[in-house]
Amino acid sequence: MVDKQSGWLERLSFRFFPGRCILCRGPATARDICDPCLADLTVTGPACRQCARPLEGSDQTRCGACLHRSPAFDQTLAPYIYTYPVNGLIQHFKFRRQLAAGRVLGSLLADWVAATGQRVPDALVPVPMSRMKLIRRGFNQSLELAVNAGSRLHCPVLPQALGKTRATPAQAELSARQRQRNLRKAFSVKHRPPLPAHIALVDDVMTTGSTLHECAKALKAGGAETVDAWVVARAL
């Protein structure tokens, strides 16, 4: 459940100290994004329960790809489609260090969990970054999202549960097949056993799901029973 006290305090602070929307710079009434811009975010429709790939005209709960080769994570929560304006929010957050966008995205993720009645897991685990990439960027966007969502859901965050064992080329530059090979055995569990039984991996965007698949494999090998994927947006 979303922290009602935090939500009330957030609304109260905006009442006396109105904020500005991080997208249009207009007045924001409840968080750092105004209601019209919030309404512009493209919400996901019917989708595969496991990987959040859109399903059209089908009564199935899983897509053909997941039925053919099931990923290591058990289900995916993806509130939005990775298109304008949510893609701009994520890019400003990741590459321009606009942490206010991260707070908005984390709170929207938590609100979606509460609105859809998803069971809150035992812990949230951010997708890790290599040491060199963390030094270059200055922060891990997945950790920021997990902390913001976790605080609203009263769910602990395990920032050191997973580590990246080696640096890998950026996934965006690779094909789907290359992404799978690129990340094989690139993650390992650093958390002292036992891991919580139910974990949600947190990341900003799911494209092919290769990163989340490899992370979930490592967590399950480390003792986790159920691993969900929580992302802000699903790329098509």
Image (cartoon, grey):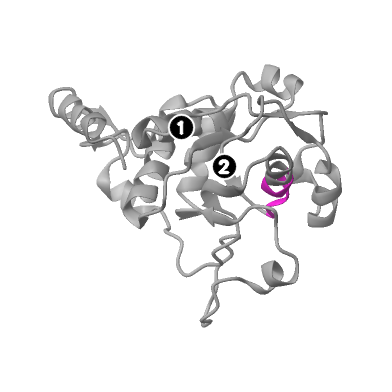
Q: Of the residues under marks 1 and 2, which one precedes in the sequence?
A: 1
Residue 63: mark: none
C-alpha gap between disc 1 and disc 2:
27 Å
**Residue, disc 1:** 102
Residue situated in front as seen by the camera: 13 or 28: 13
> Is residue 147 found inside the magenta-colored segment of the image?
no
Q: Quadrant of residue 14?
A: top left
Q: Is residue 95 left or right of residue 115?
A: right
Residue depicted at x 34% and y 39%? 24
Report which quarter residue 135 is drawn in.
top right
Under mark 1, the amino acid is Gly
Report the residue that reaches farthest toward the front. 194
Question: x%, y% of residue 54?
Answer: 55, 68
Q: Residue at x 35, y 34 (%)?
A: 152
The part of the chain drawn in magenta is 208-214
Image point (86%, 48%), residue name:
181
Relative vertical location of residue 82 with respect to residue 193 in this rendering, above or below: below
Residue 169 position, x and y percent, is 82, 36
Residue at disc 1, secondary structure: helix
